[in-house]
Amino acid sequence: MNKVKIISIIYAIGILIGALFFEVWAAETSFTKTIGVFIWTIIFLITLFFADRNEKE
């Protein structure tokens, strides 16, 4: 398995955990939960960029 697939699987698992256990997409979501999802996505995009760049070299 290459790094991009592993990173994508970890991201998807994190989103599912956030949705099911932390109720990120509940009717009454706090501001911190929303920021947490944005930070998780930003971390995903940064790691995806560096993994793809290192894979091409």
Image (cartoon, rainbow, N blue to C red):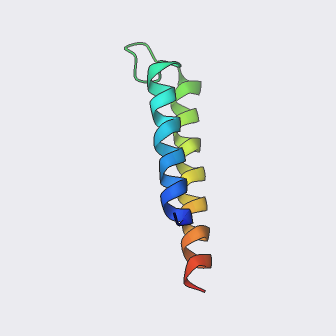
- 49 or 35: which is nearer to us? 49
Residue at the image position 54 percent from the left and 55 percent from the top: 7
The extreme front residue here reads 1
Residue at the image position 57 percent from the left and 43 percent from the top: 40
Q: Is residue 1 above or below residue 56?
A: above
Q: Is residue 29 above or below residue 13?
A: above
Look at the image and tell me in which quarter the C terminus lies: bottom right
- 6 or 12: which is nearer to us? 6
Q: Where is residue 3, by image quadrant?
A: bottom right
Residue at the image position 51 percent from the left and 28 percent from the top: 17
Q: Is residue 37 above or below residue 30?
A: below
The extreme left residue here reads 27
Residue at the image position 48 percent from the left and 59 percent from the top: 5
Q: Position of residue 35 (x, y in %)?
A: 56, 34
Q: Is residue 12 above or below residue 56?
A: above
Q: Position of residue 34 (x, y in %)?
A: 51, 30
29 displayed left or right of 39: left
Q: How many marks?
A: 0
Q: Position of residue 44 (x, y in %)?
A: 55, 53
- 30 or 50: which is nearer to us? 50
The extreme bottom residue here reads 57
Q: Position of residue 4 (x, y in %)?
A: 51, 63
